[in-house]
Structures are given as structure tokens and as C-alpha cells.
Image (spheres, grey):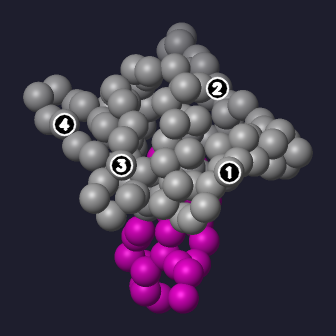
């Protein structure tokens, strides 16, 4: 009998707790640049690093977070000998309950759409934003 896969769930965060964390990260910020720096500082203080995750269906180790010259927050991901800075705003987790995939662009007979990287196990899709 094959071993059963352990179901992965993401911890939930209430809207109230999220608002509190945003307020803590951006308190006394005078502009957007300071707010971004506040978010990076909050992430660095509260995120347990390193950790393993899947990015676009590929297992990676997230070892750090940082900022690009354009002030994008990036996750520093390592896989084997390869190291890549991935903007965290570009990685969207699949909202399907119990799914640990990410939404990735896909092509279909009616054009492009977003679909889960865990297809065919997860069949979640949504239209691309206009």
C-alpha cells in the first residue's frame, strides 16, 4: 500500500492581526520607500529562515529576504548550486484549500490564464488580470 501524503496547510492570519502587523511595520513612515524598508525589517525579524518551499513547482530553500535597487522585496532562493532573487509579489499561493502550489501563467485554447503549479492534482484556475 503506498504511503499517504501529508496534507499541507498554510497558517491562517486574521484581517485584524494582518492590519496590526502592517501598522507595526509602517509606523512613522514618511513615504513608500520607508514603508517598504519597514516591511523588510518586519519580515527579517519574524520569518524563520532558512525554510524549504516550492516556487513554481520547484523545491527551493529560502535563505534570506532583501531589497532590489527598485525597492522590490525579494526572497533569496537556493536550489543546488543556483541562487535566485525572486520578488515576493510575483509569487501567488494557490487559494485552493490544502494546496501548496503557486499560481503560474498557462496557455489554453482561449488564451492565457493562471493555473495551479500542482496540476493535475489541483485544478484551480483564474483569469489573468486585465
3D distance between C-alphas at marks 1 and 3:
20 Å
Which residue is under mark 2? Answer: 7
Question: Is 127 above or below relative to 49?
Answer: below
Question: Is 96 above or below relative to 7?
Answer: below
Q: Which mark is residue 83?
A: 4
Nearer-the-camera pick, 38 or 5: 38
Badge nearest the viewer, 1 or 2: 1
Q: Along the polypeptide, which appears first: circle 2 or circle 3?
A: 2
Q: Is residue 106 left or right of residue 120?
A: left
Quarter of the image holding residue 8? Answer: top right
Which residue is under mark 3? Answer: 67
3D distance between C-alphas at marks 1 and 4:
34 Å
Q: Tell me the quadrant of the picture where the N terminus can be found.
A: top right
3D distance between C-alphas at marks 1 and 2:
41 Å
Q: Residue 28 carries which label?
A: 1
Disc 4, SS: strand
* Viewer can see residue 59: no
Q: Position of residue 81 (x, y in %)?
A: 11, 28
Measuring 53% from the left and 79% from the top, which residue is drawn there? 128
Measuring 60% from the left and 71% from the top, which residue is drawn there? 126
Q: Are marks 2 and 3 in contact (CB under 8 Å)?
A: no
Badge nearest the viewer, 2 or 3: 3
Which range of residues does the magenta coloring cover? Answer: 105-130
Q: Are marks 1 and 4 in contact (CB under 8 Å)?
A: no
Q: Along the polypeptide, which appears first: circle 1 or circle 4?
A: 1
Amino acid at each position: 500500500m503506498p504511503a499517504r501524503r501529508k496534507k499541507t496547510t498554510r497558517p491562517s492570519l486574521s484581517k485584524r492581526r494582518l492590519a496590526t502587523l502592517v501598522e507595526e511595520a509602517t509606523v512613522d513612515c514618511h513615504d513608500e520607500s520607508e514603508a517598504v524598508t519597514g516591511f523588510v525589517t518586519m519580515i527579517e525579524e519574524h520569518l524563520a529562515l532558512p525554510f524549504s518551499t516550492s516556487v513554481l513547482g520547484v523545491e527551493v530553500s529560502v535563505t534570506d529576504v532583501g531589497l532590489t535597487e527598485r525597492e522590490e522585496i525579494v526572497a533569496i532562493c537556493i536550489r543546488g548550486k543556483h541562487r535566485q532573487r525572486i520578488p515576493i509579489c510575483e509569487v501567488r499561493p494557490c487559494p485552493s484549500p490544502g494546496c501548496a502550489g503557486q499560481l503560474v501563467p498557462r496557455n489554453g485554447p482561449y488564451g492565457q490564464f493562471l493555473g495551479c503549479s500542482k496540476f493535475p492534482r489541483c485544478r484551480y484556475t483564474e483569469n489573468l488580470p486585465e
